[in-house]
Image: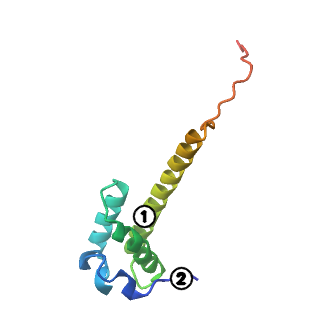
Amino acid sequence: MLDMAPESENGGNLPDWAGGKGAEPSRSSLAMIRQAVTNNWEIPNEWKAVLPKICLKMVADESRGDRERLRAIEILRAMNRDNLEAAQVLDKVERLDQGQATERIELGPIEWNP
């Protein structure tokens, strides 16, 4: 079972059109949010904490249409991808700071096959 955040947690952080103050985002709002996440638009930090909770709630709501649930999944997937990329960059920077290899390439013997 998914642990859903109470309605009041997204209170004043988001505008009404994006699911703030207990409102539900529309399909066009979801498309715009997905574009913002996918295209790396600047999103306020307060929104970044609330959007996954709203999207999870929408995915679990079976009364919603398939398109809206799919849009919410796409937003979650894009946010997850961004988090993974940030973690990889952070790992690389930490390795560089410690003087460790960041990428390892091993060359084997070269053979000629005519």
Badge count: 2
Amino acid of disc 2: Asp
In the rendered view, tell whether residue 27 sits above or below residue 35. Answer: below
Distance, label 2 to label 1, CA atoms, is 19 Å
Looking at the image, which residue is at 44% across and 61% down?
A: 79
Identify the element where label 2 is drawn. Answer: loop
> Residue 44 sits in which quadrant?
bottom left
Residue drawn at (74%, 19%) of the image: 109
The residue located at (52%, 55%) in the rendering is 84
Mark 1, Cα crowd under 10 Å, few <14 / some 14-19 / many 20+, is: many
Q: Position of residue 31 (x, y in %)?
A: 31, 65
Name the residue at the front extreme.
98
Q: Quadrant of residue 92?
A: top right
Location of the N terminus by quadrant is: bottom right
Crowdedness near tag 2: few (<14), some (14–19) or many (≥20) residues, C-alpha within 10 Å: few
Residue labelled with disc 2: 3
Which of 112 and 78 lies nearest the eye of the viewer? Answer: 78
Colouring mode (rainbow / by chain / secondary structure / one colour): rainbow
Residue 45 placed where, x, y %?
35, 66
The quadrant of the picture occupied by the C terminus is top right
Horizontal side, residue 95 vs residue 60: left or right: right
**In front: mark 2 or mark 1?**
2
Name the residue: 55% across, 81% down.
Answer: 2
Q: Amino acid at mark 1?
A: Glu
Residue 54 against residue 89 in the figure, above or below: below
Residue at image mark 1: 74
Q: Quadrant of residue 64?
A: bottom left
Q: Earlier in the sequence, mark 2 or mark 1?
A: 2
Residue 6 position in % (x across, y down): 43, 87
Observer-nearest residue: 110 or 20? 20
Is 113 left or right of 60, judged from the image as shown? right
